[in-house]
Amino acid sequence: VQLVESGGDLVHPGGSLSLSCTASGVTLSSADMTWVRQAPGKGVEWVSTIYPKRNLTTYTSSVKGRFAISIDNAKNTLYLQMNSLKTEDTAVYYCATGSAPWPIRGQGTQVTVSS
C-alpha cells in the first residue's frame, strides 16, 4: 500500500484547503480510510474516517461541520475539504488505512493556518 498526500499550504484563518491522498495497492471504494493529523509537539489526532461500504463518514468534534471527507472512486483518491480553518488546525495531515495507531500512512502534507 502506498499513500501520497498533497494540497497542504499556508492559509489565513477562515480560509479553505482541499487535501488529496492518492492511493495504490488499495481500492478506496472498499477500504475504510482515515485522515489524522499531528500538530507540533503533540501526538497523532484522529480527524475523520470514511466507510464506503456503509456510506458513512465520521469526524472529530472540533472539525465537524467544517471538514468533509470524500472519495473519488475513478481516481482512487481520498479528499479532505477543509473550510473555516482555524489556527488550531495547523498540523501535518496524513491519510491512513487500518486502525489506530494507523501505521500505514503517507508522508504527510503540512497545513499552516496563520494570519
Image: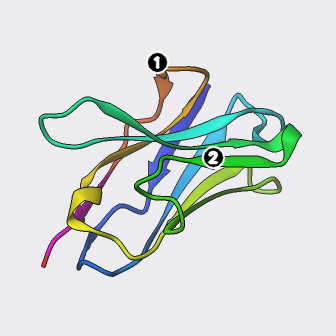
First-in-chain label (1 vs 2): 2
Q: Position of residue 7 (x, y in %)?
A: 42, 63
Q: Where is residue 3 in the image (x, y as percent from the top left)?
A: 54, 37
In what quadrant of the picture does the N terminus appear?
A: top right
Q: In the rendered image, which residue does mark 2 sit on? A: 58
Q: Nearer the viewer, mark 1 or mark 2?
A: 2
Front-most of residues 109 and 33? 33
Q: Residue furthest right?
A: 53
Q: Which residue is drawn at 46% across and 18% down?
A: 103
Quadrant of residue 44 within the rendered picture: top left
Q: Identify the secondary structure beneath mark 1.
A: loop
111 within the magenta span: yes
Q: In the rendered image, which residue does mark 1 sit on? A: 103
Q: Which residue is drawn at 45% across and 58% down?
A: 63
53 within the magenta span: no
Q: Pointer 1: residues within 10 angstroms few (<14), some, or many (20+)?
A: few
Magenta region: which residues?
110-114
Task: Check disc 2 and give the amino acid type.
Answer: Thr
Front-most of residues 104 and 98? 98
In what quadrant of the picture does the C terminus appear?
A: bottom left
Determine whether, in the image, residue 75 is placed left or right of residue 3: right
Q: In this view, does 2 lie above or below 52?
A: above
Magenta stretch: helix, strand or loop mostly: strand
Q: Distance between the residues labelled 1 and 2?
A: 20 Å
Q: Identify the secondary structure beneath mark 2.
A: strand
Task: Check disc 1 and give the amino acid type.
Answer: Pro
